[in-house]
Amino acid sequence: MAFKGHMRSADLPIQHEGFLEHKRFRWANVAILLAVVSIIAYFAADVEPRPNGGTWIGYVLGTVSALLIVWLSMLGLRKRAVKPGRWSLKGWTSAHVYLGAALLVLATLHTGFQFGLNVHTLAYALMVVVIVSGFFGVYYYAVIPSRMSDNRGQRSQAELLEALHALDRQLRESAQPLDQVYVREIKRSIRRTKIRPPLFGSIASLKRRCPTERALKRMQKAEPNAPDDMRDAIKDVTAILQRKSALLQRTRQHIRYKTLLRLWLHIHVPVTLALLIALAAHIISVFFYW
Protein backbone atom coordinates (compact mmCIF):
# COMPACT_ATOMS: atom_id res chain seq x y z
CA MET A 1 0.00 0.00 0.00
CA ALA A 2 1.46 3.31 -1.03
CA PHE A 3 2.07 5.88 1.67
CA LYS A 4 -0.33 8.85 1.58
CA GLY A 5 1.22 12.08 2.71
CA HIS A 6 -0.54 15.11 4.10
CA MET A 7 -3.33 16.52 1.97
CA ARG A 8 -2.42 19.67 0.13
CA SER A 9 -4.43 22.81 0.86
CA ALA A 10 -5.77 22.64 -2.70
CA ASP A 11 -7.23 19.19 -1.92
CA LEU A 12 -9.17 20.41 1.08
CA PRO A 13 -12.84 21.28 0.67
CA ILE A 14 -13.42 25.02 0.29
CA GLN A 15 -15.83 26.44 2.84
CA HIS A 16 -17.80 29.50 1.85
CA GLU A 17 -17.51 32.37 4.31
CA GLY A 18 -20.59 34.58 4.38
CA PHE A 19 -20.55 38.27 5.23
CA LEU A 20 -21.84 37.54 8.73
CA GLU A 21 -18.85 35.29 9.50
CA HIS A 22 -16.31 37.56 7.79
CA LYS A 23 -12.85 37.31 9.36
CA ARG A 24 -14.13 35.10 12.18
CA PHE A 25 -16.85 37.59 13.19
CA ARG A 26 -14.38 40.47 13.43
CA TRP A 27 -17.02 43.18 13.11
CA ALA A 28 -19.40 41.40 15.47
CA ASN A 29 -16.70 41.57 18.14
CA VAL A 30 -16.03 45.24 17.37
CA ALA A 31 -19.74 46.04 17.63
CA ILE A 32 -20.11 44.20 20.94
CA LEU A 33 -17.06 45.99 22.36
CA LEU A 34 -18.40 49.37 21.21
CA ALA A 35 -21.81 48.71 22.76
CA VAL A 36 -20.34 47.48 26.07
CA VAL A 37 -17.97 50.46 26.36
CA SER A 38 -20.84 52.84 25.64
CA ILE A 39 -23.07 51.25 28.29
CA ILE A 40 -20.29 51.40 30.91
CA ALA A 41 -19.48 55.03 30.03
CA TYR A 42 -23.14 56.03 30.20
CA PHE A 43 -23.78 54.60 33.64
CA ALA A 44 -20.36 55.62 34.98
CA ALA A 45 -20.71 59.25 33.89
CA ASP A 46 -20.95 61.63 36.85
CA VAL A 47 -23.86 63.66 35.51
CA GLU A 48 -26.86 65.05 37.37
CA PRO A 49 -29.71 64.40 37.33
CA ARG A 50 -28.95 61.73 34.71
CA PRO A 51 -27.06 61.47 31.40
CA ASN A 52 -28.93 62.74 28.34
CA GLY A 53 -28.27 64.25 24.95
CA GLY A 54 -27.32 67.62 26.44
CA THR A 55 -24.52 66.30 28.69
CA TRP A 56 -20.92 65.60 27.74
CA ILE A 57 -21.54 61.84 27.50
CA GLY A 58 -24.64 62.56 25.43
CA TYR A 59 -22.61 64.67 23.01
CA VAL A 60 -19.96 61.96 22.71
CA LEU A 61 -22.52 59.21 22.07
CA GLY A 62 -24.46 61.49 19.71
CA THR A 63 -21.38 62.38 17.68
CA VAL A 64 -20.34 58.75 17.32
CA SER A 65 -23.92 57.77 16.43
CA ALA A 66 -24.21 60.53 13.79
CA LEU A 67 -20.89 59.53 12.21
CA LEU A 68 -21.99 55.90 12.16
CA ILE A 69 -25.31 56.78 10.50
CA VAL A 70 -23.56 58.73 7.74
CA TRP A 71 -20.95 56.03 7.23
CA LEU A 72 -23.50 53.20 7.19
CA SER A 73 -25.66 55.05 4.66
CA MET A 74 -22.73 55.10 2.23
CA LEU A 75 -22.74 51.33 1.67
CA GLY A 76 -24.41 51.78 -1.73
CA LEU A 77 -21.52 53.99 -2.86
CA ARG A 78 -19.00 51.60 -1.37
CA LYS A 79 -20.40 48.77 -3.47
CA ARG A 80 -19.16 50.59 -6.55
CA ALA A 81 -15.77 51.49 -5.10
CA VAL A 82 -14.43 48.65 -2.96
CA LYS A 83 -12.04 46.03 -4.26
CA PRO A 84 -11.14 42.51 -3.10
CA GLY A 85 -8.69 42.41 -0.24
CA ARG A 86 -8.57 44.40 2.95
CA TRP A 87 -11.47 46.66 1.98
CA SER A 88 -13.63 44.00 0.36
CA LEU A 89 -17.35 44.41 -0.20
CA LYS A 90 -17.93 41.46 2.14
CA GLY A 91 -16.02 43.25 4.88
CA TRP A 92 -17.94 46.48 4.38
CA THR A 93 -21.24 44.61 4.46
CA SER A 94 -20.27 42.76 7.63
CA ALA A 95 -19.32 46.03 9.31
CA HIS A 96 -22.56 47.61 8.06
CA VAL A 97 -24.66 44.90 9.71
CA TYR A 98 -22.94 44.68 13.08
CA LEU A 99 -22.15 48.37 13.57
CA GLY A 100 -25.75 49.12 12.59
CA ALA A 101 -26.92 46.86 15.41
CA ALA A 102 -24.50 48.57 17.84
CA LEU A 103 -25.87 51.94 16.71
CA LEU A 104 -29.21 51.03 18.24
CA VAL A 105 -27.51 50.86 21.66
CA LEU A 106 -25.45 54.04 21.23
CA ALA A 107 -28.31 56.18 19.92
CA THR A 108 -30.69 54.99 22.64
CA LEU A 109 -28.16 55.93 25.32
CA HIS A 110 -27.67 59.29 23.57
CA THR A 111 -31.37 60.07 24.02
CA GLY A 112 -31.14 59.45 27.76
CA PHE A 113 -34.45 57.61 27.31
CA GLN A 114 -36.19 60.96 26.83
CA PHE A 115 -38.68 61.09 23.96
CA GLY A 116 -41.31 63.53 22.76
CA LEU A 117 -43.13 64.93 19.74
CA ASN A 118 -40.13 66.63 18.16
CA VAL A 119 -37.55 66.27 15.40
CA HIS A 120 -35.13 64.53 17.78
CA THR A 121 -37.51 61.66 18.47
CA LEU A 122 -38.43 61.57 14.77
CA ALA A 123 -34.77 61.02 13.86
CA TYR A 124 -34.50 58.27 16.48
CA ALA A 125 -37.71 56.57 15.26
CA LEU A 126 -36.52 56.65 11.64
CA MET A 127 -33.20 55.17 12.74
CA VAL A 128 -35.00 52.31 14.49
CA VAL A 129 -37.06 51.63 11.36
CA VAL A 130 -33.90 51.57 9.23
CA ILE A 131 -32.10 49.21 11.61
CA VAL A 132 -35.07 46.86 12.02
CA SER A 133 -35.61 46.76 8.25
CA GLY A 134 -31.89 46.08 8.00
CA PHE A 135 -32.35 42.97 10.14
CA PHE A 136 -34.91 41.74 7.60
CA GLY A 137 -32.42 42.57 4.85
CA VAL A 138 -29.76 40.47 6.55
CA TYR A 139 -32.14 37.53 6.56
CA TYR A 140 -33.17 38.03 2.95
CA TYR A 141 -29.63 38.36 1.60
CA ALA A 142 -28.26 35.55 3.78
CA VAL A 143 -31.01 33.05 2.96
CA ILE A 144 -33.02 33.98 -0.12
CA PRO A 145 -30.28 34.09 -2.82
CA SER A 146 -29.31 30.46 -2.15
CA ARG A 147 -32.97 29.44 -2.10
CA MET A 148 -33.49 31.26 -5.40
CA SER A 149 -30.57 29.41 -6.94
CA ASP A 150 -31.79 26.01 -5.69
CA ASN A 151 -35.36 26.73 -6.77
CA ARG A 152 -34.68 27.80 -10.35
CA GLY A 153 -32.23 24.96 -11.01
CA GLN A 154 -29.44 26.91 -12.73
CA ARG A 155 -31.94 28.72 -14.96
CA SER A 156 -32.61 32.43 -15.14
CA GLN A 157 -36.08 33.93 -14.85
CA ALA A 158 -36.10 34.54 -18.61
CA GLU A 159 -35.31 30.87 -19.22
CA LEU A 160 -38.08 29.78 -16.85
CA LEU A 161 -40.60 31.96 -18.68
CA GLU A 162 -39.41 30.71 -22.07
CA ALA A 163 -39.79 27.11 -20.88
CA LEU A 164 -43.40 27.89 -19.88
CA HIS A 165 -44.10 29.37 -23.31
CA ALA A 166 -42.60 26.27 -24.92
CA LEU A 167 -44.91 24.04 -22.87
CA ASP A 168 -47.89 26.18 -23.93
CA ARG A 169 -46.95 25.60 -27.58
CA GLN A 170 -46.70 21.86 -26.93
CA LEU A 171 -50.11 21.91 -25.24
CA ARG A 172 -51.77 23.58 -28.23
CA GLU A 173 -50.26 21.02 -30.61
CA SER A 174 -50.92 17.95 -28.45
CA ALA A 175 -54.53 18.97 -27.74
CA GLN A 176 -55.52 19.06 -31.44
CA PRO A 177 -56.78 15.42 -31.58
CA LEU A 178 -59.01 15.91 -28.52
CA ASP A 179 -62.70 16.81 -28.42
CA GLN A 180 -63.35 20.53 -28.64
CA VAL A 181 -64.51 20.66 -25.02
CA TYR A 182 -61.00 19.62 -23.94
CA VAL A 183 -59.33 21.89 -26.48
CA ARG A 184 -61.25 24.85 -25.09
CA GLU A 185 -60.26 23.84 -21.55
CA ILE A 186 -56.57 23.73 -22.52
CA LYS A 187 -56.72 27.09 -24.33
CA ARG A 188 -58.56 28.64 -21.38
CA SER A 189 -55.91 27.38 -18.99
CA ILE A 190 -53.15 28.91 -21.15
CA ARG A 191 -54.96 32.22 -21.43
CA ARG A 192 -56.00 32.60 -17.79
CA THR A 193 -53.05 31.17 -15.90
CA LYS A 194 -51.32 33.85 -13.81
CA ILE A 195 -47.60 33.50 -13.35
CA ARG A 196 -46.91 36.36 -10.93
CA PRO A 197 -47.91 35.35 -7.37
CA PRO A 198 -49.46 37.70 -4.81
CA LEU A 199 -46.87 39.29 -2.54
CA PHE A 200 -48.20 37.90 0.73
CA GLY A 201 -50.72 35.31 -0.46
CA SER A 202 -50.04 31.59 -0.41
CA ILE A 203 -48.44 30.13 -3.52
CA ALA A 204 -50.02 26.77 -2.65
CA SER A 205 -53.45 28.45 -2.58
CA LEU A 206 -52.75 30.07 -5.95
CA LYS A 207 -51.84 26.65 -7.32
CA ARG A 208 -55.15 25.15 -6.18
CA ARG A 209 -57.07 27.92 -7.98
CA CYS A 210 -54.83 27.87 -11.04
CA PRO A 211 -56.53 27.15 -14.41
CA THR A 212 -53.60 24.92 -15.33
CA GLU A 213 -54.22 22.82 -12.23
CA ARG A 214 -57.94 22.58 -13.01
CA ALA A 215 -57.18 21.49 -16.57
CA LEU A 216 -54.74 18.88 -15.26
CA LYS A 217 -57.32 17.41 -12.88
CA ARG A 218 -59.93 17.30 -15.62
CA MET A 219 -57.60 15.48 -18.02
CA GLN A 220 -56.64 12.99 -15.29
CA LYS A 221 -60.33 12.24 -14.68
CA ALA A 222 -61.01 11.89 -18.40
CA GLU A 223 -58.17 9.46 -19.12
CA PRO A 224 -59.65 6.20 -17.67
CA ASN A 225 -62.89 6.50 -19.68
CA ALA A 226 -61.42 8.06 -22.82
CA PRO A 227 -61.88 6.35 -26.22
CA ASP A 228 -58.90 4.40 -27.43
CA ASP A 229 -58.20 6.85 -30.25
CA MET A 230 -57.87 9.76 -27.79
CA ARG A 231 -56.21 8.06 -24.84
CA ASP A 232 -52.65 8.60 -26.06
CA ALA A 233 -53.35 12.27 -26.77
CA ILE A 234 -54.86 12.72 -23.30
CA LYS A 235 -51.80 11.08 -21.74
CA ASP A 236 -49.51 13.44 -23.67
CA VAL A 237 -51.51 16.51 -22.65
CA THR A 238 -51.64 15.33 -19.03
CA ALA A 239 -47.87 14.84 -18.93
CA ILE A 240 -47.27 18.33 -20.36
CA LEU A 241 -49.70 19.86 -17.87
CA GLN A 242 -47.87 18.11 -15.02
CA ARG A 243 -44.54 19.54 -16.20
CA LYS A 244 -46.10 22.98 -16.58
CA SER A 245 -47.64 22.85 -13.10
CA ALA A 246 -44.27 22.01 -11.53
CA LEU A 247 -42.51 24.72 -13.56
CA LEU A 248 -45.16 27.26 -12.61
CA GLN A 249 -44.48 26.49 -8.96
CA ARG A 250 -40.77 27.14 -9.43
CA THR A 251 -41.32 30.32 -11.43
CA ARG A 252 -43.81 31.77 -8.97
CA GLN A 253 -41.49 31.05 -6.06
CA HIS A 254 -38.60 32.70 -7.89
CA ILE A 255 -40.68 35.82 -8.61
CA ARG A 256 -41.82 35.91 -4.97
CA TYR A 257 -38.21 35.83 -3.73
CA LYS A 258 -37.14 38.51 -6.21
CA THR A 259 -40.08 40.75 -5.28
CA LEU A 260 -39.29 40.47 -1.56
CA LEU A 261 -35.72 41.60 -2.17
CA ARG A 262 -36.90 44.58 -4.22
CA LEU A 263 -39.58 45.47 -1.68
CA TRP A 264 -36.99 45.53 1.09
CA LEU A 265 -34.82 47.95 -0.88
CA HIS A 266 -37.83 50.15 -1.63
CA ILE A 267 -38.41 50.48 2.11
CA HIS A 268 -34.86 50.55 3.47
CA VAL A 269 -33.36 53.09 1.06
CA PRO A 270 -36.08 55.82 1.20
CA VAL A 271 -36.32 55.59 5.00
CA THR A 272 -32.52 55.91 5.17
CA LEU A 273 -32.71 59.12 3.13
CA ALA A 274 -35.46 60.40 5.44
CA LEU A 275 -33.25 59.55 8.42
CA LEU A 276 -30.36 61.60 7.02
CA ILE A 277 -32.67 64.60 6.57
CA ALA A 278 -34.07 64.24 10.09
CA LEU A 279 -30.55 63.81 11.46
CA ALA A 280 -29.45 67.05 9.80
CA ALA A 281 -32.49 68.83 11.27
CA HIS A 282 -31.71 67.35 14.70
CA ILE A 283 -28.09 68.57 14.61
CA ILE A 284 -29.00 72.03 13.32
CA SER A 285 -31.70 72.50 15.95
CA VAL A 286 -29.32 71.44 18.74
CA PHE A 287 -26.42 73.70 17.80
CA PHE A 288 -28.29 76.74 16.50
CA TYR A 289 -31.54 76.89 18.48
CA TRP A 290 -30.65 75.47 21.87
Image (spheres, rainbow, N blue to C red):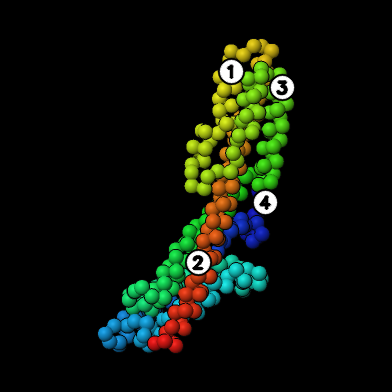
Q: Work out whether 249 lies above or below 76.
A: above
Q: Do residues under tags 1 and 3 come within 8 Å of each other at their CB atoms?
A: no
Three-letter code for the amino acid on which mark 1 is drawn: Ala
Q: Quadrant of residue 59?
A: bottom left
Task: Find disc 2 in the rendering and name its residue.
Answer: 271
Kindly identify the residue that appears in the image at 58 percent across and 15 percent down: 224
Q: CA distance from mark 4 to mark 2?
A: 65 Å
Mark identifier at residue 2: 4
Kindly identify the residue that appears in the image at 44 percent across and 65 percent down: 129
- Looking at the picture, how far across and down is residue 83, in whole percent? 66, 71
Q: Quadrant of the C terminus?
A: bottom left
- Looking at the picture, how far across and down is residue 285, in whole percent? 43, 83
Q: Residues within 10 Å of mark 1 (few under 14, many from 20)?
A: some
Task: Find disc 3 in the rendering and name its residue.
Answer: 176
Between disc 2 and disc 1, the foreground one is 2
User: Element type at marker 1?
Assistant: helix
Between disc 1 and disc 3, the foreground one is 3
User: Element type at marker 2?
Assistant: helix
Q: CA distance from mark 1 to mark 3?
A: 16 Å
User: Element type at marker 4?
Assistant: loop
Task: Find disc 1 in the rendering and name its residue.
Answer: 222
